[in-house]
Amino acid sequence: MFRLFSVRLLLLFVFNPVYAQSDVEKRIQTQCILAEDGDIIEIPAGNFSISGTLSLDEKKNVTLRGAGQDKTILSFKGQKQGAEGLKVTNCTNIILENFTMEDAKGDIIKTQNVSGIIFRDITARWTGKPDESNGSYALYPVQCQKVRIERCTAIGASDAGIYVGQSDSVWVTECTAKNNVAGIEIENTTNAWVWKNHAFENTGGILVFDLPDLPKKRGGHVKVYDNLVARNNYRNFAPKGNIVGTVPAGTGVMVLATNDVEVYNNKIWENKTVSTGIVSYYITETPINDKSYIPYPSGVSVHDNIFSDGRRMPTLKNKLGFIFWWKFGKRVPHILYDGISNPDWVNADGSFKPSYRICIGENENGTFANLRADKLSLMSDRISRDQTHFNCNK
């Protein structure tokens, strides 16, 4: 009976497009509610207006499939109910593929408490000028396991285009993120691989963060490699109070307060403020109330990347950007470490204990500076370019 219903639905879409346009939302949601183990929900080609959040809850082995990113477009521009475009919760082995969603009031696609979620060949975007009124996240898996995001495009998010939070066993590959505040963000997430992506014209290209006050306290074991991270110089349009609002325009890669992160074999080009930053949470100047939170980066390695040569101009609309301009002018080193570390992790001679080392090496045009912000303040003259304690080949 259900299969017959699916066939009738497809026939209505194909042979009665006017009727389908007015009733498509109800029919997609009905299929999501009635879906059984192993079902494929097909959304045909067309540009459809959706007025409320579509949802998939407590399902197993279900695929939601469009006719192609440029063929199946679901627009939430007139959304009246809910915040997300599509919300998937408490599911197992879900595949979302071959469609575009745009202009949701909040996040475009949010998945939560899902084990086995694949985003494949999806575009999630806001079509207007990037603005703080846009939703926070385009693709937003949170508290998920076994996450795959491949060949997707995210545009216009006021926080992060592709955001993976508090999750485990993740890969993000062959994706494009542009005109977001953060292009790709891995937050409080373990065992993540981010490779062969193109992050450009965002405020910050790729961010790997651990933040306080979250159920999952510690991320790490993240590899960022073979990506093109270029010209991430777009103005920061995050709403006031968002942590990504502290990221200066012109940031390529930033590793904040997390551990065991390897950044290698990337092309990090023409990011005007900081090509790669390794920083503690203290750099945000935000109070920490979470007593179990570890605010320092550790076990970070940046090697074998190619940085663009030539002059840059740090943003003057951000405190960090202003300090970089004041200290370095148009010659900001490509790799910056804020120098704020846990005293228990450092030997008497200033070198790191093995488990906590910050390693810098074999980068083309990989100029370096230790801001030594633990010594008085960023405004002091204690910046060091000495890489002795950061050479892990010794």
Image: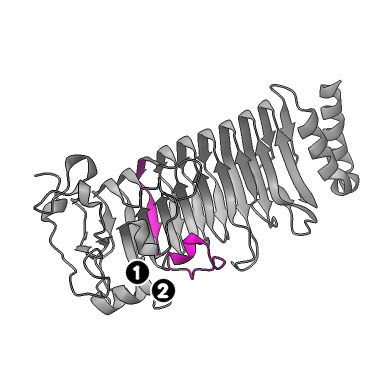
Q: Position of residue 133 (x, y in %)?
A: 64, 66
- Point out the stretch of residues depicted in magenta: 221-246
Note whether 369 is above or below 166 in the view shown.
below
**Which quadrant, please, contains the N terminus?**
top right
**In the image shown, does 90 or 334 lie closer to the viewer?**
90
Residue at the spot of label 1: 273
Disc 1 to disc 2: CB gap under 8 Å: yes
Residue 244: image x %, image y %?
Answer: 48, 61
Magenta-drawn stretch contains 327: no
Q: Amino acid at mark 2?
A: Asn
Task: Tell which of 390 and 303 is nearer to you.
Answer: 390
Residue in the picture at 59% in, 66% down: 130
User: As displayed, is residue 43 above or below residue 210?
Assistant: above
Question: In this rendering, would 356 be left or right of 350?
Answer: right
Tell which circle, 1 or 2, labels the residue nearer the N-terminal end. 1
Q: Viewed as shown, does residue 131 lie left or right of 167?
A: right
User: Which residue is identified by label 2?
Assistant: 318
Tag 2's secondary structure? loop
- Give the quarter of the image for residue 336: bottom left
Kind of element beneath mark 1: loop
The image quadrant where one finds the C terminus is top left
Q: Is residue 57 visible?
A: yes
Q: Position of residue 155 (x, y in %)?
A: 57, 57
Q: Is residue 46 visible?
A: no
